[in-house]
Structure formats: C-alpha cells, structure tokens
Amino acid sequence: MEMRKESNHFVIRLTRGEKLFESMQSFFEQTGVKGGRVQGIGAVDEITLGRYVLETKGYVWGTWQGEFEVVSLQGTISETGLHAHAVISDHSFQCFGGHVKEARVSATLELFVTELKKIRREMDSEVGLKLLEL
C-alpha cells in the first residue's frame, strides 16, 4: 500500500495480492482516521460479496475468483472500520455487486479517502445492523 495525503484527503494505491480490509486496517492504524468516506476503482481476482436479508438479519455470501473490474467501490469509515459496497464486472461485461467482505487486488486498486470527524455506529435491533449514529 502506498498513500499520499492532501489536506483531509488521502490517495491510496493497493497493488497485486494485497487485500482490501487488511490494507485499510493498516491505513487506519497509520493515520488514525476514524471517520470518512471512500471511493475506488481497479481490478480484483477474488472477492466476497454479500446481500443483507432483513427477515433473517443476516448476510447471504458469495465468493468469486477470476478477473474482475471494480467499476465502483463506495464506503463509509467509522470507528469500527470500513463498510464498503462494490459493483464489479466480469469477462463478459456483466455487472453485479453487494456488500464487500473481502477483496484481493489483481492489478491495482485506487482508493480515495475523505477524512471526516469521528463517526460512530450503534446497533439497531429492529434492523439487526450497526447503523451510523448521527
């Protein structure tokens, strides 16, 4: 992982073989960022995505391996870490996406973080998720 800071913005480049959440945990430890938003594009060769099922208050997960373009990665950063969703495309340009559990970089992953004040999450028992506390 390489990074550069400009004001309250960070530009991060992940390289082949790096994992998104391990890298972001290292980023949080190095910078102390506890609130913000992240955007990204790039390519991955393994990704685990999920979709939340409100009725069961749990995720359904799927893992894919191959060559995928990260068309869009968006997320929030809170004191509990990164919460990200992504849309990826496969070899036939079909797109799919969901909540990102983990992703391994195949070529590069370019991330842009805007730091905000500390953001907290609190469990919402009706939904079954830790939601942003505003």
Image (spheres, rainbow, N blue to C red):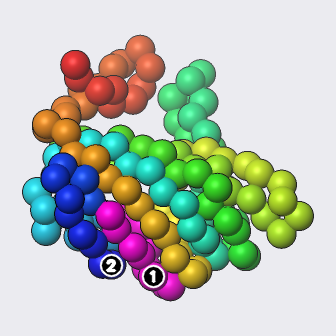
Characterize the local packing of mark 2: few (<14), some (14-19) or many (20 or more) Cα atoms within 10 angstroms.
Answer: some
Q: Is residue 45 visible?
A: yes
Residue located at (23% from left, 23% from top)? 133
- In the rendered structure, are the residues bearing label 1 and label 2 in contact, judged by CB atoms less than 8 Å apart? yes
Q: Per the image, is 71 magenta?
A: no
Task: Report the side of 67 relative to 49 (left or right).
Answer: right
Residue located at (20% from left, 63% from top)? 5
Q: Which residues are magenta?
A: 11-22
The disc, 1 or 2, on the residue closer to the chain's N-terminal end is 2
Q: Percent x, y for residue 27? A: 23, 66
Residue type, numbered disc 2: Met
Q: Which residue position holds label 2? A: 1
Q: Which residue position holds label 1? A: 15
Characterize the local packing of mark 1: few (<14), some (14-19) or many (20 or more) Cα atoms within 10 angstroms.
Answer: some
Instruction: Locate the N terminus by quadrant.
Output: bottom left
Q: Is residue 22 visible?
A: no
Residue type, numbered disc 1: Thr
Residue located at (16% from left, 53% from top)? 7
Residue 99 picture quarter: top right
Taking depth in this image into account, of 10 and 70 the one nearest to the observer is 10
